[in-house]
Image: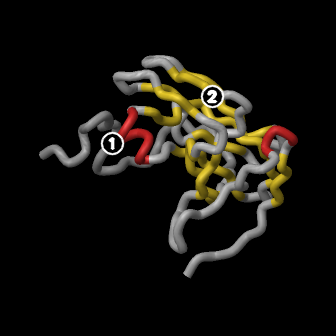
Amino acid sequence: MTQQTTVSIQRLPHGEGLTLPFYASELAAGADIRAAIEHDIQLDVGTHQLIPTGFSMALPAGLEAQIRPRSGLALKHGVTVLNSPGTIDADYRGEVGIILINHGHQPFTIQRGDRIAQMIIAPVVQVHFQSVHTLEETERGAGGFGSSGKH
């Protein structure tokens, strides 16, 4: 069963006529986000650009929005979200922007209303960081970067 929380969204003038973030299926985890651009944008191979979405939002305290790539864009065109997952904090009130990068082999054209990313709303835990002289030992210890699972 999914939990329902309300997030206030403000449509910006250049977002008029576009669908606000929406879940494409009943059990979708990510809400699709559309490009709020006036003219087509060509994303050349190896380049990145900030794409406006035409909305701002007010997340409740204790939540974040994670911006993630759409799998179809990544698979078919090599286009993905550069800082994936991007984080939108609960106290941010500016326009949501999506940094897209073209890792594909051909230029990619973004058109107004294209679904360019997905947004996951997730809980956040803030912790107190405490300086200590030593850390408790674990079986793994300091092994990292591919060390787990090796015998």
Residue 40 circle label: 2
Instruction: In this rendered view, identify the residue nearer to me: 53 or 62.
Output: 53
Residue found 57% across the figure and 33% down from its top: 110
C-beta proximity under 8 Å, tags 2 and 1: no
- Could you say where residue 9 lies in the image, as x and y percent from the top left? 81, 55
Callout 1 secondary element = loop
Q: Quadrant of the N terminus?
A: bottom right
Instruction: In this rendered view, identify the residue nearer to me: 118 or 139.
Output: 118
**Between marks 2 and 1 in the image, the one whose residue lies nearer the viewer:** 2
Residue found 52% across the figure and 69% down from its top: 25
Residue found 59% across the figure and 63% down from its top: 23
Q: Residue furthest bottom?
A: 1
Three-letter amino acid code of the residue under disc 1: Gly
Nearest to N terminus: mark 2 or mark 1: 2
Q: How is the image coloured?
A: secondary structure
Q: Is residue 19 left or right of residue 71?
A: right
Q: Is residue 75 left or right of residue 25?
A: left
Residue 141 circle label: 1
Instruction: In this rendered view, identify the residue nearer to me: 97 or 14.
Output: 14
Residue 89 circle label: none
